[in-house]
Amino acid sequence: MDSLSARRFNFLTWLRNSFLTGVALVLPFVVTVSIIWLFVTFIDNNVEPLVPETLAFLKTFPGGGVLLALVTLTLVGALAGNLVGRWIVATGDRVIANLPLVRSIYGGAKQVFKQVAAPERTSFQQAVLVEFPLPGSYAIGFITNENTAEIVSDIGEELIAVYVPQAPIPTSGFLLYLPRTAFKPLSISPDEALKRIISLGIIRQDEGLHTGK
């Protein structure tokens, strides 16, 4: 009887472990495909009404709006690189700069998408460990700017801009200005540190998080 109960217990354990392994393997693919599909559908629904009749064939297959948007953005980027295009962009910037509310929104959005268009100048320069939000507790942060003289000119001390994201959604967080002694550089890359934030600390490497000397 004990042997039968043990076999039943082992089978249930195996069944549970197999199910959880299947979930861990399949759900990431499902989530990825779902997000891509939602993105494609959103773009299609907003771009297809603007498609002229001469390009109506783009409406016949999923992703037609995305394809048109990619081609259009590429052409706009190419045109903006010549003299006339730069003049048009500069003129548009000057007009928007005179609109009190709009210029703030446009300026912030432009800075964000400039970083997306130029990943080699990413704002996340280095991953660091910060004592935050309370003494004795630590959070992963990212150095975003070391040239902060215009912000801290009245303090008389060099401060570094460090962004501390909230897990698991790193697009929201806290911007801190800290002296260099207030944080410790991490030996992992910003991308690896970001993975740990999004995964709530589940993802790790064998060497773990090591602070630089």
Image (tube, helix red, strand yellow):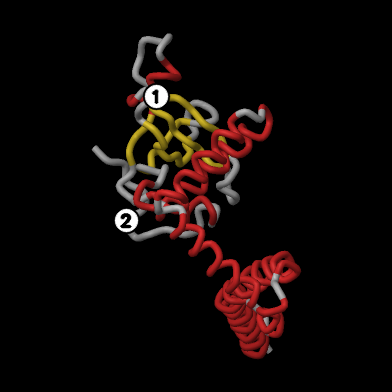
Q: Is residue 120 left or right of residue 140?
A: left
Q: Along the polypeptide, which appears first: circle 2 or circle 1?
A: 1
Find residue 68 and report its horizontal and vertical position in percent.
60, 71
Q: Residue 69 occupies which quadrant of the picture?
A: bottom right
Residue, disc 1? 148
Residue occupying image coordinates x 51% and y 50%: 197
User: Residue at 54% across / 68% down in the picture?
Assistant: 70
Between 83 and 135, the residue placed more toward the observer is 83
Residue 123 spot, x, y in % from top left:
42, 42
Vertical relation: 153 (above or below) 7: above
Mark 2 or mark 1, which is nearer to you?
Answer: 1
Q: Secondary structure at mark 2?
A: loop
- Of residues 52 and 206, which is closer to you in this image? 52
- Amino acid of disc 2: Glu
Which residue reaches farthest left? 213
- Give x and y (percent) for residue 149: 38, 19
Residue 74 percent across, percent down from the top left: 49, 64
